[in-house]
Amino acid sequence: MLNIEIDKLTNSIINAITGDIFDTEVLAANLQDIKTTKKGWHFDWEKESSKGKVHKLVIEGNPNIVQGLISLIDQKDNIYISLVENAPYNIGTNKVYEGVAGNLFAFACKVAFEKGYEGYISFHAKTELVQHYMKSLGAKSINSQLMYIDTREATILVNRYFKNFEI
């Protein structure tokens, strides 16, 4: 059940204090990355790594500082987001960077295009965030909490974050 707010759709991530923009990259998370999530993170990413493929968002050239994590499961016709989480320092009013969550959702859509699923992703949202995902991401509701992003909205997200990706 996803419980993350999309604070801002950017074209990378933005330092919330200075406004400086940083290019990002998404890499496969390794065991060392997962071990850094013990303090301050809400989810058990070690347990999650046994269910889905976990990726980390980092600032380009700085692969050791994780800005956020996402767990993806290939459903053979779409990519299911099992979990997504901002690093503790990217949450709340004192967050360091904005745009982390949007970046991770865009990555999931990119993977769905690469797999031939026309950008389709799905996820379960907390009830209180369903409207938020509809408004911020263009997500659609299948039932009360199961949501998806279709080709049109996925294209918008991928084009925003991955300039050199051919859809």
Image (cartoon, rainbow, N blue to C red):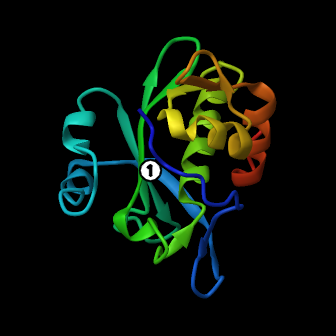
Does residue 163 appear in this view? no
User: How many numbered circles are shown?
Assistant: 1
Where is residue 147? Give x, y as percent: 59, 25
Q: Which residue is mark 1?
A: 27
The residue drawn where x is 69% and y is 57% is: 9
Residue lying farthest bottom?
18
The answer to whether 58 appears left or right of 9 in the picture is left
Where is residue 132? Give x, y as percent: 64, 43
The residue drawn where x is 76% and y is 52% is: 160
The quadrant the C terminus occupies is top right
Does residue 107 appear in this view? yes
The quadrant the N terminus occupies is top left
Where is residue 43? Give x, y as percent: 27, 45
User: Which element carries disc 1, helix, strand or loop?
Assistant: strand
Q: Quadrant of residue 117?
A: top right
Q: Quadrant of residue 114?
A: top right
The answer to whether 50 appears left or right of 101 in the picture is left
